[in-house]
Image (cartoon, coloured by chain):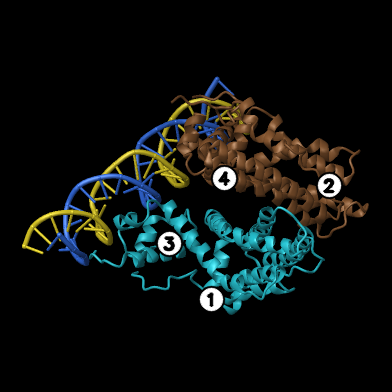
Chain colours: A cyan, B brown, C yellow, D blue
Amino acid sequence: MPRIIKHPELRREELLDHAQALFLTHGYDRASLNDVIAAAGVSKGAFYHYFASKEALLEALAERFARQALAGVQKILDDPNLDPLGRLNALMATSRQAKIETAPEAWALFETLFRPENLVLFHRINLAASKSFSPVLVQIIRQGLDDGTFRTFDPEGVADIVMQFGTATYDIIAKAFAGGSDADMEIAIETLEKRVRLYEIALDRILGLPDGSIRIGEPGYVRAVMTARRDNPAETAAAPKRAGRD
Amino acid sequence: MPRIIKHPELRREELLDHAQALFLTHGYDRASLNDVIAAAGVSKGAFYHYFASKEALLEALAERFARQALAGVQKILDDPNLDPLGRLNALMATSRQAKIETAPEAWALFETLFRPENLVLFHRINLAASKSFSPVLVQIIRQGLDDGTFRTFDPEGVADIVMQFGTATYDIIAKAFAGGSDADMEIAIETLEKRVRLYEIALDRILGLPDGSIRIGEPGYVRAVMTARRDNPAETAAAPKRAGRD
DNA sequence: TGATGAATAGACCGGCGGTCGGTATAATAG
DNA sequence: CTATTATACCGACCGCCGGTCTATTCATCA
């Protein structure tokens, strides 16, 4: 193979891009390092020049995800016109609706991230995301406590519960995709819709708010997300944006 | 090697025993099949006679765990003198205290299960356990709704939240063990203690109970669990009970 | 221009999960 | 008491994996 030298940052991003695509389509365990370097058009040596191990690659990928996710809600965090409750609601609505709107890769990413072989990948991303979002949530909750909007305690703990509720959808969605049939999907949608309502009430009560204050998503939005695939046919999962050499 | 034939059920249990010990001590990924069959004193062919793959072995192990866990709380489930709240409290207290009392393997199992390399193993066990425990919890919650003790809805959802709270301790505990230092451990203990109090209140409110109804564990019990190691020095994790051939 | 180090290449390695043809033992039938 | 079949078991072998290592090429700058 001819020797091709690129700007290190670009090369690194390319490796992450192709790793992301392959990890999502085949799973972290099943996608081999050889696959990644073949897709990226790079030698073993080059790869290990950038990443210490396959594990480190996963870690870097998770961090990049988390960074992007946080950037995606930055305007909500900066908006001075929002009170704590409004900010919390906006945050939850956005972090979920983002899955529909940043099409068409979004669905593919969404679907593949919940496949059972991606448990490790999912967990890493979630861990990194939690580390980014937790302080933000804590700050909002603290502010809500100060101005009397919320009546609760242990802001860190409450923040964790909020994120937990987000993560908890994992197994339900995973089961929907595992089954694969339309019936399984239908059951999952209804379960999720019901679960979202429960989470809203649960958060209301945990935060000491009147029922109906927290709005994660209006009724029907779960179906909108889960059936978005038909409108957004994305064959390839999270294809790299840059020119690859396949 | 001489050919040794054992009762198939015994052989299968032996394989599970040694797999359990190795998976817990070294993690599912890092413990190789060769390690398992070497520990069990069995050939590759024999192994694949009993399990279709390493994955299937993990699955069987998780199911055995779940079965044992359910058996451990059977008397609580059968006790006719308990009302829904009492049964729920007893269930949560037991499933946590079991970790102290069924010494000395308990601590080792507890500690190793939360090591980062055991994420997959942990998730499998939790999935299997959830499948066993969910119907039981749902039944208790339904009963509590019928007799007016609880005021909530979506029993399946609430049951999931209950189990979620149990699982949620994973990352906190994992971090404690990851750090390794006494300071990290101390922080984790205090965080957990606080978190348990929060979960109690959260469950109270979700179930529509007066604050203080749910008692997951009395104050100080987290420290009791986490420091039990000193009283229960268990070098080897979950050593097999049957005679191996090492 | 020559030297230095970052970037790249790819042969190589031990060990992995898994397969397969074969063998010894147990169970069953005649 | 055989002959036959089914089951339990053995271990050599396979393709591929993640990771290492040495060699080479290219950019940089004294």
**The disc label shown at residue B212, or none:** 2
Looking at the image, tell me whether mark 4 or mark 2 is earlier in sequence order.
4
Q: CA distance from mark 1 to mark 4?
A: 36 Å
Closer-to-camera residue (A22/B242): A22
Q: Callout 1: few (<14), some (14-19), or many (20+) C-alpha neighbours within 10 Å? A: many
Figure quadrant of the N terminus of chain B: top left
* Left or right side of A75 for B207: right
Please tell me how many numbered marks the rendered image carries: 4
* Left or right side of A54 for B172: right
Which residue is disc 4 drawn over?
A: B175
The residue at the point 83 percent across, 60 percent down is: B153
Which residue is disc 3 drawn over?
A: A19
* Left or right side of B155 for B59: left
Find out whether the residues at labels 4 and 2 contact each other: C-beta distance under 8 Å. Answer: no
Label 3 or label 2, whichever lies nearer to me, is 2
- Which chain's residue wears label 4? B
Q: CA distance from mark 3 to mark 2?
A: 49 Å
Which residue is disc 1 drawn over?
A: A104
